[in-house]
Amino acid sequence: MTVQEIIDGMIEKTGVTPLPYDKTCDHIMCGSKDMEVTKIVTTFMATVEVIREAIRFGANLIITHEPTWFTGLDETEWLSEDPIYLKKRKLLEENGITVYRFHDHMHMDAEDGIYRGFDLEMGWKQYRIENAPGMEHFGCCYQIPKIKLRELSDFFKEKLAMEVIQIVGNKEMEVERVGVLVGGGSLGLGIEELPMQLMDKNNLDLVVCGDITEWTISAYVNDATALGFNKGMLVLGHERSEEMGMKHLVPWLKDIIGEIPVKFIDAKEPFQYL
C-alpha cells in the first residue's frame, strides 16, 4: 500500500468528509504520498527520539497527531535556515521516512479517536454521562466511583507513568463527577469561558486538563475552593492526555493496513522535574 492509500483509508474510516487541503493541518510533513509503506509507527509527536526509534524498528511511515515543525500549522517558511529544522529533516529524508499528521479528521470522528484511546486506556467508557445541552462536542463527562483527588492523582500517575501531577483544590476532596478536556481543549478552543461553563453546567467536581492558562480554569477552581465549593482540577498536560489516543490507533488501523507491521512509540513528556 502507498502512503496515500493508507491516508484515504483512515479518513474514510472516520466517516468525516475529507477536509479541503487549506482547511486542515492533516498533511504530509515530509516524504512522498506515493511511497510503498513497509512498516508504520504511531505517536503523539514525531520528535527526534521517536524518529530514531522508528528507524530502529525499520518504519518508513510515521503517523503523528501533533506538529513536526514546531507550530500549530507546521509552517516551515520561517525555518528555511534554521539548523535544528534542517538537521531533523535530513534525518527523515536520509532514512526514507514519510511523516503524516492525523489530527483534525481524528478529532472529528464521531467518537473522537483521542477520547476513544483515553476511555480504553483508563477503562472509563462505562462511566460516560451525557454532556449538558449545547456542549455535546466539548470534552467528555464521567460519573466514576467516588475517589479522593489524591487517590485519583495516584491512579493517573501509575497509568501514565508520570512523576508529577499538578492539582488545584483540596487533595482530600471526594471526586465523582469528572470532565475531561484533553490537549488544548482545556484552553477552551478559542472560547476561554468554555471550561468553566462545562464545569458549571454539568455540576462537575473535577476537570482533568491537558493544557492550562492560569487565569481561566485554574483561577476559577482556586476561587471555588476558597469559597467552600467541592471543586478541583488535575493537570495531565497536552502530551500525556492525548498520547493514549495514538497508542490505541494501532488496532484501529489494522483493517486498513492489513499485514503491514505497525508499532506505537510513546513520545513521552517533554519535561524533566528537579
Image: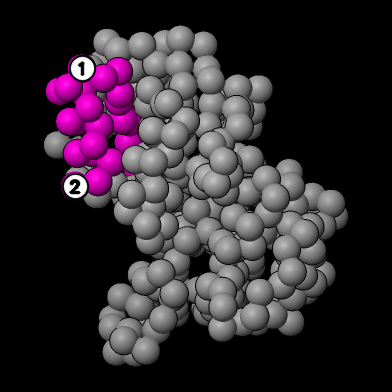
- Residue drawn 74% across the image and 82% down it: 34
In this view of the protein, which residue sits in the foreground, 132 or 55? Answer: 132
Whether residue 6 is visible here, answered yes or no, is: no
Q: Disc 2 marks which amino acid?
A: Trp
Q: Earlier in the sequence, mark 2 or mark 1?
A: 2
The mark closer to the camera, 2 or 1, is 1
- Residue drawn 39% across the image and 84% down it: 76
Magenta extent:
215-237
Where residue 136 appears, as percent x and y from the top left, is: 58, 44
In the rendered image of this protein, does residue 237 appear above or below residue 47?
Answer: above
User: What colour scheme governs how the chains and residues are painted in the rendered image of this protein?
Assistant: one colour
- Identify residue for label 1: 228
Can you tell which quarter of the image residue 95 is in?
bottom right
Give the structural element (helix, strand or loop) at label 2: loop
In the rendered image of this protein, does residue 15 appear above or below residue 91?
Answer: above
- Identify residue for label 2: 215
